[in-house]
Image (cartoon, grey):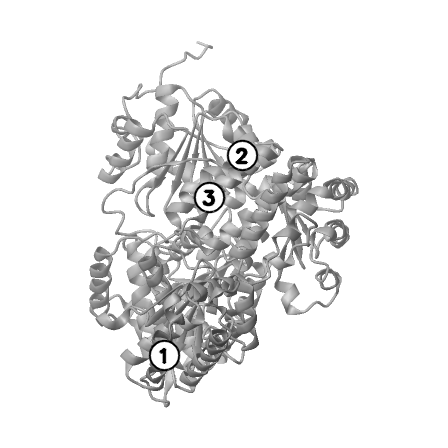
Amino acid sequence: MAFKRRQADAVGVPGDPEQLYRLLARGNRGPDSVWGHQSKVLEHWHKEFRDKSDVALELPTGAGKTLVGGLIAEYLRRAEGRRVAYLCPTRQLAVQTAKKLDDYGIPPSLLIGPSRHWDQADVARYQAGGSVAVSTYSHVFNSRPRIDTADALILDDAHAAEGYVAKPWSLRISRRTHETAYKDLLTALSPALDPLLLPHLRSDNPGSQYLAGIYLASPAVVAAHAGHVESVIREAVAQGKISDDAVHAWKFLETHVADCLAYVSYREILIRPLIAPTFQHGAFSNPQQRIYMSATLGAGGELERAFGRPRIHRIPVPAGWDKEGTGRRFFLFPELTRDLASNPKAVAPFVRRVIEQAGRVVVLTPETRVADRFCERFLPEDFLTFTAAEVEDDLSVFTSEPAAALVLTNRYDGVDLPDDDCHLVVFAGLPANGDLQERFLHDFVGADEVLRERIRARIQQGAGRATRNLRDHAAVLVLGRDLTSYLARRDIQASMHPEIHAELEIGVDASLDQTSQDLWGNLAIFNAQDSEWEEVEEDIVRHRETYDRQDGPGAAALQKAVRSEVAAANALWSKDHQFALTAIKTVTDQLRNAQTPKRYSSLWSYLGFCVAHRLANGSSEPQLRQTAANYFREARRNSLGTTWFDRVAPVAAPSTAAVEELEPTDEAAMNAILAAKDLWNPEAFQAVLETRAGLQQSDPDPYEDGLVHLGRLAGATKSYGDSRDGRAAQPDAVWIFSDARWVIWEAKNQATETGEIGAEQARQAGGHRRTTEKAEGAVAPGDSICVLVSPKSKVNEGTYNVAEENVYWVRPPEVLDLFDTLTRAWQDARARNLLAMSVSDLAAVFREHQALPSQWLPTLRHQPLWRSPAQ
């Protein structure tokens, strides 16, 4: 018979995804049944989240995430007749996923590579609902999406998708490859930048500061000159002066430059919206449901910002898998060892020795320059090197070589190296160097909390490239001061999956205050995986079971604010500036409470200023000018400790009305001093002066008492000590200057002058900030510092590699000098009877004596413990 009869799917229509697999398992090549934790996730989705438009589920590596996603896709296809597309970050992962789905009995249509090469029969099967399309993110997030008729999307490795999602709206122009277009656009954006920057950005030989800098062009000024900026880009497109990717991005950005942020560096210019306007992209927004799958999701709104969705419902991690991971990792920190910390040149021979022993290594770097430096400095000469593109379709070109390095740039997942494929992973540098926006937020705004989930996910995923099953083991070599100090932080360790938390602790202990030869011996024990390692293994498992992953103190507020952030970004894109201003007000209100990061809030306040400024210029309503002035003042205050705010172009009124005479910490101190009525009493004032004697002693209790009273003289609104209960983890004194700045003290005044300040003391001092945040129920203002008082004259070189970038070292005589300076200012003010005078009058007196916080803080910050004097 010539005609083919249509037949129903062999397994029929199931009642739920688990029943579907029982039917599929009769003839497939997969497991006999779903695991218990998989069953719980599927049940959660089917009963509670089946009708939600955006749902996220978290399953660690090895927990069978692909089967869960595949069963949801196949259930929707069979039971509800939906077209379903399963998206992966890379072609390699798409190929692996299609094979797994086929093994499970789920018919895939593999649609990767150029769409003109797709098998049209596979396309037709997917379009007719006869198979699940397996493709990549780029075929949905594209100016001409080829996967654009799906009823449901399964988005795998969602934690790594922000770059793919934002790409269609990201116009990048590189100075190296498109110099003429770069310089033309720099000129067009110049009114929106600090004029002092421009000569350096135009120079052929800028200083290192300007080579590394990333600058935000004032959105208010860009909007005012948007027509000219767009004409320059339009001309570049017409004359073929920019890349194909930039041309495609221009299709999305044309007429929207005023609604974007423009970031300028010496090497590149990036124009993109803060949050991708996916609501206007039908290929993503039209499907009835989007399922986001990840080995790590976390909190803080990162997923919502990445995909531009106001709310994503989360299915909880199944019990048990919230503790246990896959395989075993041993983290090595060579730059924490005693001999290598004091002799950085010896690090490279040690690393080469580790790599030579391993044979094959995967190297994870945040950017090309770091990758090039690594290969030049650390890679043995006889090693072959491979890039991601070279293994995209066939990993065996790497795994078949006995001495080879797979060097990946800004890619931390999508490459699986199980069993003996690889036993060594190298992290070179902190994985926080995505596009210019990400680097700007991390390095210049200091919005660590907002990017923490992204960085955490990259570290966890990258560390697991060579541990893909329970039997796998791999060493993870950590290089670079920024990453070393980051992973040595106890709060960062606590934010990781409990198993990686325990592994990091063991790794730091095995490196810190040890020699490189000790570390080499520990690596040998790990590689042998015999009885000696079993004792360490027991420690990791025991510690793992006691840990719960901890979100940062601002995560809850950031998660709450993200809905308004998405609404504000979408309103800006839609040119509804009045609603955008309303949404920004909600964002800043939600980020204003004590449990949120002020630096990220400063950026939103500045955006509020820019929107209010634009509205005020087109209106006679005076309230808009006042609104703009208020936002400007708020942005300036919350950006303390950063440089980005001072690098945007100065904007004419209404911003000029927001400039304050006093620095915020000075203002807070003067107000506190005027409010300290008891200290204006002679007897009380004399009692405080007598505590100076405690600052001359080695006894800790009188010294702490002296620090607390010194804080009162300095104008702290709150000054107290916490360590008298004997808990070493508590700071010795805390000075809080309203919402402007905290100064937190760790006193080692009892120490001798001989010896060195060790790394553990620096870690303890750095941890006091988080201890105080927990006690205060607040996040420390951005420019807060931790001060370690010690009479020692030297610092152990390893200390510089582990100290956080807010820890400073002072000697006891400097503290005593500060006490005397403040005493003289107080005595002068009391002699002039300034109690009833204004803040500015009191500030004038303190300024004469160099007693304002802005005058004495540089002394406390003179010797950072996070930067060696040789650096």
Point out the tag, 2 or 3, that comes first from the N-terminus. Answer: 2
Q: Secondary structure at mark 1?
A: helix
Residue type at mark 2: give it: Thr
Label 1 is placed on what type of residue?
Answer: Gln
Residue at far bottom of view: 754
Can the viewer see residue 403 in this picture?
no
Residue 508 sits in quarter = bottom left
User: Dividing the picture into quarters, in which one does residue 663 lie?
Assistant: bottom right
Residue labelled with disc 3: 589
Disc 1 marks which residue? 686
Mark 1 Cα-neighbour bin, 10 Å: few <14, some 14–19, many ≥20: few
Measuring 67% from the left and 59% from the top, which residue is drawn there? Answer: 266
Q: Nearer the viewer, mark 1 or mark 3?
A: 1
> Label for residue 278?
2
Q: Nearer the viewer, mark 2 or mark 3?
A: 3
Q: Toward the viewer: 690 or 361?
A: 690
| Gap between marks 1 and 2 measured at Cα | 65 Å
Q: Is residue 775 visible?
A: yes
Tell me, for residue 752, which label it has, or none.
Answer: none
Residue 12 drawn above or below residue 253: above
Q: Residue 776, image x and y in percent?
A: 34, 58
Q: Amino acid at mark 3?
A: Asp
Tell me the element at label 3.
helix
Q: Is residue 626 left or right of residue 352?
A: right
